[in-house]
Image (cartoon, helix red, strand yellow):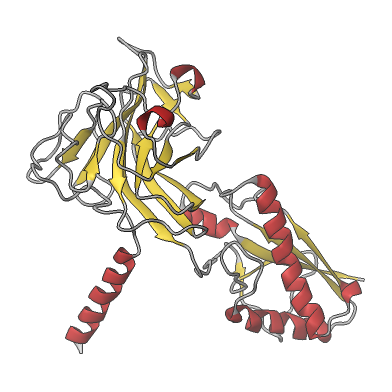
Amino acid sequence: MKTIVQLFILLASSILFSQNLVLNPSFEDCSHCERSMGQFDKNVTNWSTPNGGTTDYFNYKGKKSYNHYNGYQKSRTGIAHAGIYVFTDKNYREYVQGTLKQTLEKGKKYTVTFYVSLAEKSTKATTDINILFTEEKLIKCYRYNYCEKQIRPKKATDKKYKKVEINTERYYQEKLGWTEITFVYEASGFENYFSIGNFNSNWKTNKIQMQRAQEYEFAYYYIDDISIESLEKKIIQEEAENEVDIAIEETLEEAEIYTFKNVLFEFDKAILVETSVKELDELYAYLEKRPLLTVEIYGHTDAIGTLKRNKELSFERAKAVADYLVLKGLNVSRINWFGFGSTKPLMPNDTEAQRKKNRRVEFKLSSQ
C-alpha cells in the first residue's frame, strides 16, 4: 500500500509540474554549473541572454555562498537563480529569455508567475520589471553585429511580439525574501519565447531611492521560479478569513458580515460551480424560516486585472448568487447585491495565498 501511495504522489507531482509551460523554470539545469557572474548565456539550459548584457547565474551546488558584489540571496527553491540589472545610470540592462514547451494558444488565458528579490546594495527600487513575449528567439547581437544595451522590441525582432507592463504602482523593495509577481495573460497565438526585465529607458522608468549611492545608481534583482500555466477551465479555489459553514439550525447575527466558504466560480466568470449549491441551499433554507430577514450579497476580487474589470466581475458574481436564491424561491424584494472589485481587501495582494483570501463572496442579514 505504501508503494502505491508513493507512486500516486509522484504521479500527481509530475502532472502538476507538467502544467508549467516554461522549460527549466528555476534554472537548475546547466552546462557548467560552477560558473556564476556573467555566465548565464549559453550555460543555463533552455535560457539565454537576449541582448548585449551579461546576466548573472548563481548555482549553490557544493557552495555555502557567493561573495557577490551586490549582496547575497538564497534561491527561492532548489539551488539556482539568476541576477539582472534592471536599472543603471547609463541605461544598461540585463534580461533572462526563456523558452516555452509549446506555442501559447490564441485566445487562451494563462497565469504568469515569477519571483524577484532586490539585491542588498541596490540604491534604487522600481516598478518596471515586465515581460516581452516573442514569436522568435531574440539574439544577443543583431543587424551588423550591433549589441543593444536596452531591448527595444521594434529593433530587436521583425516577427510578432507583445510587451506586457505588469505593474505601474508597486515598487519591488523586498531584500530579505522573495516577492511574487503574477498576472493573467490572454495569448495571441504566436508566443514561443519570453524575456523578463526592464524595457523602458531611464527617464521612463519608475524608481525610488533605497539608499545613498556610493559610486553609481542601480537596481539589481535576483529572479527565480518562472511559471506560465493554462487557466482554461480552471476553477478558483477560494478560502477567505472568517470562513463560516452555514447550518440551518445555526443562529446568524444580524448586521454581521459572513464569508461563504465554498461559493466558487469558473475562472474570470460569474458562473457558479456545482460545489456552491449546498451552501447556498442552506442559506435559502435559513431565510425561508425567517421571512422578516433580508440579505445583502457582496462580491470581492483580488487586485489582479483592471479596476473596471474587477468591479464588473465582483458585481456579476454577487448577482449570480442573488439570482440563484431568487430562483430557489426567495422574494426579490428581500435581496440586494453589490460588487466592490478589489477596493476592500482583507490583506495585501502580495502572494497567491493572500489573493485567495481577498477573492470572496460575503453576505449580511437585516430585519425588514
Q: Residue at x 14, y 40 (%)?
A: 43
Q: Is residue 232 left or right of residue 26?
A: right
Rendered view: 163 above or below 274: above
Toward which corner of the image does residue 80 lie, by quadrant?
top left
Which residue is nearer to you in this view: 205 or 333?
Answer: 205
Rendered view: 153 above or below 107: above
Q: Split into 4 quadrants, where in the image is the N terminus?
A: bottom left
Q: Residue at x 28, y 51 (%)?
A: 25
At which x and y percent is residue 29? 16, 50
Q: Is residue 67 left or right of residue 55?
A: left
At which x and y percent is residue 288? 82, 85
Q: Split into 4 quadrants, where in the image is the C terminus?
A: bottom right
Using the rendered image of the protein, determine whether residue 250 is visible from the camera's viewpoint: no
Q: Residue at x 65, y 82 (%)?
A: 277
At which x and y percent is residue 211? 39, 18
Q: Is residue 327 left or right of residue 236?
A: right
Toward which corner of the image does residue 69 lie, by quadrant?
top left
Rendered view: 62 above or below 153: below
Which residue is nearer to you in this view: 52 or 317?
Answer: 52
- Seen as rendered, the residue at the extreme top is 215
Toward which corner of the image does residue 129 lie, by quadrant?
top left
At which x and y percent is residue 189? 45, 54
